[in-house]
Image (cartoon, helix red, strand yellow):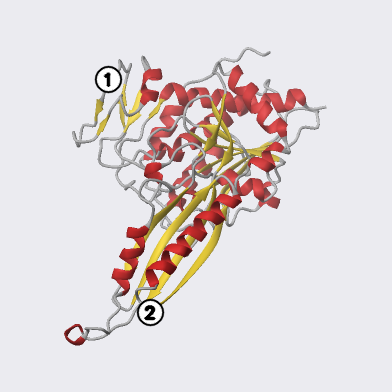
Amino acid sequence: MTSIKFSHTVTERFLRYVVIDTQSDPASPTCPSTEKQKNLGRLLVSELQAIGIGDAHLDEHGYVYATIPANTDKKVPVICFCSHMDTSPDCTGKDVKPQIVRNYRGGDLVLPADPTQVIRAAEHPALADQIGNDIVTTDGTTLLGADNKAGLAEIMDAAHFLVQNPQIRHGTIKILFTPDEEIGRGVDKADLKKLGADFAYTIDGETAGNIEDETFSADGATVTIEGVSTHPGFAKGKMEHAIKIAAAIVERLPKQTCSPETTEGKEGFLHPIGISGALEQATLGFIVRDFTEQGLKEKEALLERIVGDVMKDYPRSTWRMEVKEQYRNMKAVIDAHPQTLEYAIEAIRRAGLEPVRSAIRGGTDGSRLSLMGLPCPNIFAGEHAFHSRLEWVSRQDMEKAVQTIVHLAMIWEERAA
């Protein structure tokens, strides 16, 4: 196996990217949902072109495409590395001020701009593996954006390394950076024909060494209540308040199970994410998650029963429920192409880590790409406590992800006929 001397520039890239606000907006109908995501896209394209990747471009929908040409005579499948540019709508990503805790010695990390924000070692057991490492956090007022700007920086650093080291043999490598992953629309406008990849990897996972070949399956459900409006001074026996009906539905949801705060592992949930309305009409939004199709259907049937039971007390009001598919578990697709996982596990080992296969209690662009015909497991990026002001990532974990990407490109070439 070729001995490789890796550079240590991924953290510099990461710090450049996180200060650009790329928060997506689920209420926006456009693609990208926020124009500011293109600001990062333009920077990434300029950096790709500067390292010699001439076809790098940003399309009108906010997607970045680029190609590292093959430098081998072997017939190697085309692989793609993918990360998303947007950050979560759950926590502000404006005016991110990253901090570096160098040579972490253990214990809690108090974030400087808001001392009530503490990354507690007892609540973040992964910190125990970071002794002596350099940890990047926020100042406590925003999220960090390691989800998924760590992945962006790692792919960019690996691309730069491969271009600068032509002695490392690899097939054609495609790069895809997507908008709007956090709102479930990350590949809505992805042009897979233009991309031209045979297999792909999202770089969007948590703990160093992890590889994920299974995700939740996901639906969204909307319940609309049509109440009965009348003047409140003359409402006795007449008014049926849509907001109160909606509140009664939420109150009937299971308390000890079937929610994010009461489940783990392979357990799914039914999760209210929004309530809006007035006396006459109210709307409840839910996300439904499970690892099996049957589990999804059971939870949707449970919601339907709860709504139906509540509505018995409001005979003159009406309701409707709409369910929309969001993404599906990618496991069956990955299982049909075992080399995607096998090669990634070997690449993680070559990077000096112990591979850990796991299932994501969530989804990635890889879920939908897999179901669209592009098998796409998810590889660690080192991100932790995402979607919160306690988000953190270590320099050393990001460097290991860069090494994993490079080794993976090499392995596909080595194993080719």
Q: Position of residue 255 (x, y in %)?
A: 35, 49
- In the picture of the structure, the residue carrying the numbered disc 1 is 107
Compared with 129, 111 (above or below) is below
Q: Is residue 209 left or right of residue 313?
A: right
Q: Position of residue 128 (x, y in %)?
A: 37, 19
Quadrant location of the C terminus? top right
Name the amino acid type tagged 1. Answer: Gly
Lower sequence index among marks 2 and 1: 1
Determine which of the numbered discs, if any, sits on residue 315 in the image.
2
Q: Residue at x 41, y 39 (%)?
A: 17
Local secondary structure at mark 2: loop
Quadrant of the rendered structure where residue 215 is? top right
Q: Residue at x 68, y 20 (%)?
A: 167
Q: Position of residue 146 (x, y in %)?
A: 41, 36
Quadrant of the rendered structure where residue 162 is? top right
Q: Position of residue 135 (x, y in %)?
A: 35, 25
Local secondary structure at mark 1: loop
Quadrant location of the N terminus? top right
Name the amino acid type tagged 2. Answer: Pro
| Residue 357, visible in the rendered structure | yes
